[in-house]
Image (tube, rainbow, N blue to C red):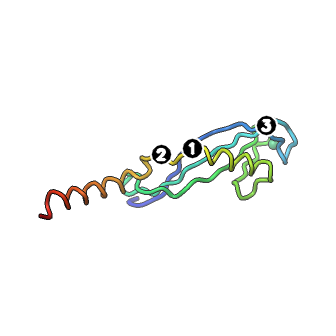
Amino acid sequence: MIVGKKSRVLKINNPEIVCVNCKKNNTITLRILGDYGHLFQIPFISKGKRGESKCSHCNQVLPHQEMNNDLKLAYFELKENVKIPIWFFAGLITIKILVIYKIIFINN
Ligand SMILES: [Zn+2]
């Protein structure tokens, strides 16, 4: 595939939250994922962050859109502290450098 989308886990946390499904405490793992578009397997541009939770007891997985308020709050707090890695933009940065190089060294 020439162009596609991939994701990478950016941060993992274990908030002290009761699972809505099985009512167990401290079984939730919250993951922040970053999506990026790639071109020839080279990360090109960030497609933003998203989150999902997983319960280690009942194995329920929830995307952040389906989280309850407690979980959503923990998700937003965690998400705020996660930066999108610069290498998500590797392709875009390379092109910008090439354009600048061309303007300075070739177009005169
Ligand atoms: Zn559970």
Residue 93 is left or right of residue 24, and the answer is left
Amino acid at dot 3? Glu
Amino acid at dot 1? Val
The span from disc 1 to disc 3 (Cα, nearest Å) is 20 Å
The span from disc 3 to disc 2 (Cα, nearest Å) is 27 Å
The span from disc 2 to disc 1 (Cα, nearest Å) is 11 Å
Q: Secondary structure at mark 1?
A: strand
Residue at the disc numbered 3: 16
Amino acid at dot 2? Pro
Residue at the disc numbered 2: 85
Judging depth in this view, the residue of 44 and 84 nearest the camera is 84
Label 2 close to label 1 by CB (< 8 Å): no
Determine if the C-beta at disc 3 is less than 8 A from ligand 1.
no
Q: Which comes before the other along the chain, label 3 or label 2? A: 3
Residue extending farthest to the left is 108
Residue extending farthest to the right is 23
Residue extending farthest to the bottom is 107
Q: Quadrant of the C terminus?
A: bottom left
Q: Residue at x 51, y 48 (%)?
A: 84
Q: Badge 3, how many Cα within 10 Å: few under 14, some, many 20+?
A: some
Q: Secondary structure at mark 2?
A: loop
Q: Which comes before the other along the chain, label 2 or label 1? A: 1
Label 1 close to label 3 by CB (< 8 Å): no
Determine if the C-beta at disc 2 is less than 8 A from ligand 1.
no
Mark carried by residue 9: 1
Indicate the quadrant where residue 48 lies.
bottom right
